[in-house]
């Protein structure tokens, strides 16, 4: 199955709640992933919070062009019981 992010909500700090097309949902903390030219601007919490779910890419994206593979998000997600 090809993974796609169906829903995403900002929770706090650099933590996002995600729901995938296979029904899995949980939280991912991206505080350690904001390095490099494209991700460093997202250390500004207002910019970080401005993500959207791109239905074509099937993942979260930011206005500056940053995005993360849904597989990466899934692997790093803390599953909610």
Image (cartoon, rainbow, N blue to C red):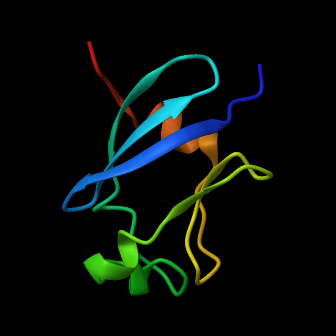
Is residue 21 shown above or below 10?
above
> Residue at point 55% right, 43% down?
72
On the image, which quarter does residue 14 sit in?
A: bottom left
> Residue at point 28% right, 62% down?
31
State how many labels appear: 0
35 or 23, nearer to the observer: 23
Question: In this rendering, would 10 be left or right of 66?
Answer: left
Is residue 50 shown above or below 33?
below
On the image, which quarter does residue 80 sit in?
A: top left
> Residue at point 57% right, 29% down?
20
Please identify the quadrant where the C terminus is shown. top left
Is residue 11 shown above or below 14?
above
Query: How far across and how far down the image is residue 63, in percent?
Result: 58, 80
> Residue at point 54% right, 17% down?
23
Is residue 57 shown above or below 77?
below
Residue found at the very far top of the displayed protein: 81
Query: How far across and how far down the image is residue 77, in percent?
Result: 39, 34
Query: How far across and how far down the image is residue 28, in percent?
Result: 35, 43
28 or 36, nearer to the observer: 28
19 or 39, nearer to the observer: 19
Residue found at the very far left of the displayed protein: 13
Please identify the quadrant where the N terminus is shown. top right
């Amino acid at each position: 199955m090809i993974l796609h992010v169906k829903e995403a909500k900002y929770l706090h700090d650099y933590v996002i709640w995600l729901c995938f097309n296979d029904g899995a949902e949980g939280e991912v903390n991206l505080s350690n992933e904001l390095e490099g030219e494209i991700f460093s601007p997202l250390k500004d919490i207002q910019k970080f919070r401005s993500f959207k779910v791109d239905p074509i890419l099937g993942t979260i994206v930011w206005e500056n062009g940053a995005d993360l593979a849904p597989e990466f998000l899934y692997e790093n997600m803390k599953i909610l019981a």
